[in-house]
């Protein structure tokens, strides 16, 4: 395998892991925050929200997945462009919207689906560009 | 509605500056030699000794907590795609701060993501 293809494959693998862990993390957070209820914007309200999130197991599960996301993200940007990895990670929004409909039964209009479709096509365009355009060694100098 | 927009602005600032700092730091750290556990632990250790990675942490924590608040205020399918505004701000940061070459095709992709986000917000 050429090094160019290798870079593409390992970047795609990291992006895939990022998407899956970010999606699972966000879903767990949503579920946890629904259990807690709307946050009141007063000092006591914010304190109560903070304490509730600390004592919520679903929130912790979400945090676990988001730490996994952060580690995959850090690994990906250790070689690949930020302007490649970041939009490529947006591929998860298609999955996210689908999960919002299937699990939370949220109503999603046709126009919003079109927006999500545009996001996906945009991400595919970015995915066609080369993942690395900087020399990592020049950054530290 | 205004409180959602303000919180969204705070979220975008924290998450973009945090991610740019993190990317800058990780480029200094360099990629792992391979994906075996030992090499990954060494890689993580190197990352945790980098000042830019630590600069990113409070910013990313700020973006995380503002996202939690946003999720309690609005439906998931509005909050999550709306945060895609990060892509435009982040791409500008990548070009001018990280000196990445953002080709026309990459900008087109980002623009499509942006229009997609606008459509999602109009519906919200």
Image: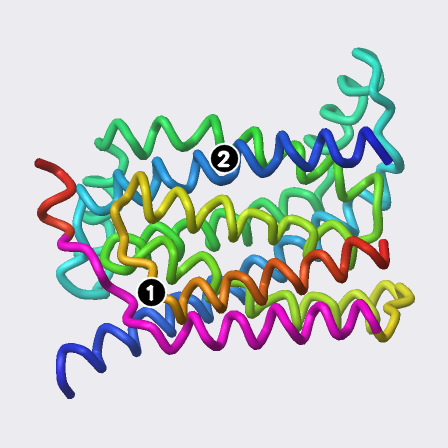
Of residues A40 and A118, the one nearer the viewer is A118
The chain identifier of the residue carrying mark 2 reads B
Left or right of residue B62: residue B69? right
Left or right of residue B106: residue B73? right
* Secondary-structure class at tag 2: helix
Q: Does B37 appear above or below A130? A: above
Residue A92: horizontal and vertical position, in percent?
59, 67
Residue in view at x 71 percent, y 31 percent: B7
Q: Is residue A25 magenta?
A: no
Where does the magenta region start and end?
A111-135
* Colour treatment of the image: rainbow
Q: How many marks?
A: 2
* Secondary-structure class at tag 1: loop
Dots 2, 1 in contact, CB < 8 A: no
What is the CA distance from the residue labelled 2 to the residue labelled 1? 27 Å
Residue B97: horizontal and vertical position, in percent?
31, 39
Residue in view at x 77 percent, y 45 percent: A32
Q: Is residue A115 magenta?
A: yes
Q: Residue furthest front?
A: B104
Left or right of residue A107: residue A44? left
Residue in view at x 30 percent, y 57 percent: A81
Of residues B109 and B72, the one nearer the viewer is B109
**Majority secondary structure of the magenta segment?**
helix
**Which image quarter: residue B12?**
top right
Say if labels 2 and 1 share a chain: yes
Instruction: Check the picture and name the quadrant holding the N terminus of chain A.
Output: bottom left
**Which image quarter: residue B103?**
bottom left
Of residues B72 and A58, the one nearer the viewer is B72
Of residues B89 and A15, the one nearer the viewer is B89
Residue B111: horizontal and vertical position, in percent?
54, 62
Q: Which residue is mark 2?
A: B60
Q: Which residue is mark 1?
A: B103
């Amino acid at each position: 395998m050429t090094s160019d293809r290798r870079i593409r494959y390992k970047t795609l693998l990291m992006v895939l892991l990022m998407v899956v862990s970010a999606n699972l993390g966000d879903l767990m957070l949503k579920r946890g925050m629904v259990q807690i209820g709307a946050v009141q914007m007063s000092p006591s309200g914010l304190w109560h929200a903070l304490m509730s999130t600390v004592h919520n197991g679903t929130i912790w599960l979400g945090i676990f997945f988001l730490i996994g996301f952060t580690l995959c993200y850090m690994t990906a940007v250790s070689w690949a462009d930020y302007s490649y990895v970041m939009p490529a990670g947006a591929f998860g929004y298609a999955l996210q919207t689908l999960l919002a409909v299937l699990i939370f039964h949220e109503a999603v209009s046709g126009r919003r689906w079109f927006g999500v479709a545009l996001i996906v096509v945009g991400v595919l365009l970015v995915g066609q560009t080369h993942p690395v355009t900087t020399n990592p060694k020049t950054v530290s100098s | 509605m205004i409180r959602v927009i303000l919180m969204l602005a705070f979220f975008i600032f924290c998450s973009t500056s945090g991610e740019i700092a993190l990317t800058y730091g990780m480029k200094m750290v360099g990629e792992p030699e391979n994906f075996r556990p030992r090499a990954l632990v060494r890689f993580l250790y190197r990352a945790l000794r980098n000042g830019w990675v630590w600069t990113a942490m409070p910013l990313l924590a700020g973006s995380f907590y503002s996202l939690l608040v946003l999720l309690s205020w609005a439906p998931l399918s509005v909050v999550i795609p709306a945060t895609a505004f990060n892509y435009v701000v982040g791409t500008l940061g990548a070009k001018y701060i990280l000196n990445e070459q953002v080709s026309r095709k990459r900008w087109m992709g980002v623009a499509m993501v942006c229009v997609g986000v606008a459509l999602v917000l109009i519906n919200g």
